[in-house]
Amino acid sequence: MKAVVHADKSGMAGLTYREFEERSPQAGEVSIRLKTAGLNHRDLFVLTRHKSSDLPLIVGSDGAGVIEAIGEGVTGMKPGDEVIINPGLGWQTNSDAPPAGFEIVGLPDHGTFAEKVIVPAENAVPKPAHLTWEEAGVLSLAALTAYRALFTRGKIEKGMKVLIPGIGSGVATFLLQFAKAAGAVVYVTSRSQEKAQKALELGADQALDSNEDWERALDGEKMDLVIECVGAATFNQSLAQLRPGGTIVTFGASAGDDVNINLRTFFYGQFNLLGSTMGSAEEYKEMLKFVECHQLKPVIDTVYPLSEFHQAFKRLEEAEQLGKIGFSIS
């Protein structure tokens, strides 16, 4: 089968589109012929985490397709079923943090940037009927991340004021859609006027220029909840917009890992700081139910043929996208 494989060199220099040997599903597994797949920032990070000395790896965490074969002991599904992949491996029920051994499709095991992928049967979930193949293929990782951050960790409620800095990424656009569907008042920031305008079209109540004075732009309005996925570049600005007793949930650090905060300001403000990442299979099913109930669809930026993976990775790396980047496979 054809696949995007990382081997021999670190970073994007190690990526090639080539033939790769197939295998058959083992007990408890299913083989899926992929229709589409989705690109995530995680796929960029994998290119450095996967070492040149490691065995070749098919990258990619998101995908949707048709079950082609089932392994021994698999029940409740059959060849021909249309499915979407939950990329989280080994985290079944909702908990404070993932259990030991939790992994994500695409490292250390092979991922979805290929004509076929083999996953545990429990990770192949019926595709929501209202989604196209392109929409289903880019949904899972970013939508699950957004769902846990907003609902499980942030405990969003109708009428809450929510700030989402750095609108544009797949997760950020899901955060906006989910928060509006939940009845929140949503504020976003962006360096791009185009992305800010698109966010308003998607339902944002106000879009701020990332470079302006946020407090002045918000006219002193304070947030109940901030979902931080940018990192050091915006963290303290985000924190400054919280009301006393407000909550900030963080799950990303694309603009720097290390942050200095004023502890006295933090504890006098009675603020809550929560970390989040991905989510459980239980939350995944809740997220799909929420998406179906509100008939939500991913915002898709661009869909490339899998053979044009270089252009897709470059667009993501340079943060040119608004929404999700996908691959058309079959």
Image (cartoon, helix red, strand yellow):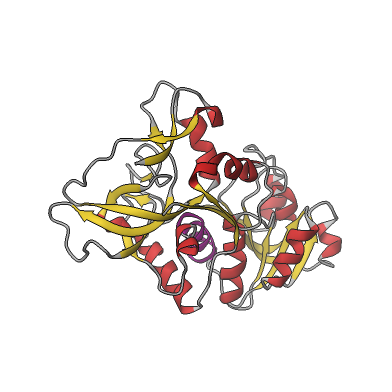
Image vertical order of residue 174 relative to residue 232, above or below = below
Q: Can residue 241 be seen in this view?
A: no
Q: Decide which of 66, 214 is in the foreground and name it.
A: 66
Q: In the picture, which quadrant includes the C terminus?
A: bottom left
Q: In the picture, which quadrant includes the N terminus?
A: top left
Q: Decide which of 270, 318 is in the foreground and name it.
A: 318
Q: Which contiguous range is marked in magenta?
A: 140-154
Who's the residue at 53% across and 72% down the image? Answer: 296
Q: Decide which of 145, 259 is in the foreground and name it.
A: 145
Question: Is 328 displayed left or right of 220 in the figure?
Answer: left
Q: Is residue 326 visible?
A: yes
Query: How many numbered marks have been drawn onto this rendered protein structure?
Result: 0
Whether residue 232 is in magenta: the answer is no
The image position of residue 310, as x and y in percent, is: 57, 39
Question: Is 314 displayed left or right of 147 in the figure?
Answer: right
Question: Is 247 displayed left or right of 294 in the figure?
Answer: right
Who's the residue at 84% across and 63% down the image? Answer: 217
Question: Is 283 displayed left or right of 139 in the figure?
Answer: left
Image vertical order of residue 310 relative to residue 9, above or below = below
The image position of residue 278, as x and y in percent, is: 46, 53
Whether residue 145 is in magenta: the answer is yes
Q: Decide which of 211, 60 is in the foreground and name it.
A: 60
Image vertical order of residue 104 relative to residue 147, above or below = above
Question: Which residue, as the protein is rendered here, is positioned at the far left?
Answer: 73
**Mainly helix, strand or loop, the magenta region?**
helix
The image position of residue 228, as x and y in percent, is: 63, 53
Who's the residue at 47% across and 31% down the image? Answer: 49
Who's the residue at 64% across and 37% down the image? Answer: 258
The image position of residue 64, as x and y in percent, is: 40, 58
Residue 259 figure quarter: top right
